[in-house]
Amino acid sequence: MTIKKEIVIIGGGPAGLAAAIEAAKRDAGVLLIDENKRPGGQLFKQIHKFFGSKAHNAGVRGVDIGKQLLVQTEETGVEIWLDSAAVGIFSEKKVAVLHEGTTVVVQAERILISTGATENALRFKGWTLPGVMGAGAAQTMVNVNRVLPGKRILMVGSGNVGVIVAYQLMQAGANVVGIVEGMDHIGAYGVHAAKIRRAGVPFYLEHTIKEARGREHVKQAVIAQMHGGRIVAGTEEIIDVDAICVAVGLRPLTELAYMAGVYHEFIPELGGFMPLHDENMESSVPGIYIAGDTAGVEEANTAMDEGRLAGIAMAQSLGYLTKEEGEKAKETVRDRLTALRQGPFGERRLHAKERILEKGAKNICQF
Ligand SMILES: Cc1cc2nc3c(=O)[nH]c(=O)nc-3n(C[C@H](O)[C@H](O)[C@H](O)COP(=O)(O)OP(=O)(O)OC[C@H]3O[C@@H](n4cnc5c(N)ncnc54)[C@H](O)[C@@H]3O)c2cc1C
């Protein structure tokens, strides 16, 4: 069965929802597909308040931003297929979707890929034992399903995800026995790290996890000092745990973009191999757009603004806005994005994004 739609958005996280709202409120026909049972992506795990400017939801919890986006999506009449996974993109912008027990092919005039990111894995002895998991999995367990993954938990990785999830596990009653970090400094924003420090959780800097021990479930973690990227023999410490969470970075989920023939380049600051895009979020394949973590791992506010940009650009390209209206609306969003990418963390990403634009994604390859 093949059906036709003007715009198909794959992934209903903050980027996909924001894009859907912008396009649908200008009367474009939008179908949003998400493999989960409810849209919102990572936002529904984010029970903490955002910081930054008022325009960027400072003081609002991620979960509440998600609820606002869902209301707006409903009001603008976006069609939503949940529990439906896009499994392929083929020629002539056809998207194969597993939907209600069958494969439906949707032919789109414009496609947005906003499938988010996935967690990096870390291989060490015992890494497949039950109780060893990604920090994102632990965050889903505790904040969405209200299940504690363990009572004595070791976090590996001191970036924002590791530190925020560690704090949320503590709020839910777990004892976080330590945060292990290979670098000589904490990766997370100071505001998040300070909360953990105040709670007395030790940071093991220049350390790594060497082994997870246990028979049917993890019972102990062996950590050790690192020097020059190598474990220093004889520095091992054994810590009793019943869960180990690994937070060692995220990488964009770009398989569908690869399949569609989108040109990629290696941009480490944004998480690895990146599908290139232009200033409208359009990829090297005309009519295929990308936004959010798929276009470079950043955070929820940048994901929403990139989604907005893509939504306006898709609607404009379909004739729902004049060139003047479209450019004006997009300029406002671009200014917000530039403001978001200030500061020591943001600036690296701003430069990485500028490199993406300089490489001129347009027409590098044709479908
Ligand atoms: C584990 C984790 C923790 C994070 N913690 C924070 C935090 O605390 N604070 C913060 O600001 N940012 C955090 N981020 C980053 C932030 O959440 C993201 O930048 C933001 O959610 C990205 O939005 P997105 O729409 O691109 O992707 P997501 O929010 O990941 O949404 C992607 C959506 O695509 C759907 N999807 C994926 N593949 C398919 C497919 N083939 N077919 C159909 N649907 C599909 C998924 O179900 C999901 O709903 C975190 C990210 C992760 C992965």
Image (cartoon, helix red, strand yellow):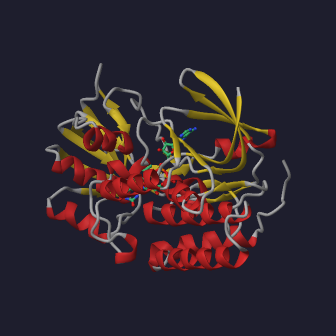
Name the side, left or right, on which 276 lies relative to 166: right
Q: Quadrant of the N terminus?
A: top right
Where does residue 3 sit, x and y in percent of width and height? 70, 34
- Residue that appears at 30% across and 57% down: 64
The answer, for residue 346, to whether it is visible in the render is yes
x, y (%) of residue 362?
80, 63
Q: Position of residue 273 (x, y in %)?
A: 65, 53
Vertical relation: 174 (above or below) 283: above
Which residue: 21% across, 56% down? 202
Residue drawn at x 23%, y 54% as measured from the top left: 167
Residue 158 shows in the view: no
What residue is drawn where x is 59% and y is 75%? 329
Looking at this view, is 341 or 250 the one in front?
A: 341
Q: Position of residue 314 (x, y in %)?
A: 67, 60
In the depicted structure, whether residue 364 falls above or below residue 357: above
* Front-lying residue, 151 or 87: 87
Using residue 184 as the reference point, say whether residue 334 is left or right of it.
right
Decide if residue 53 is on the left or right side of residue 361: left
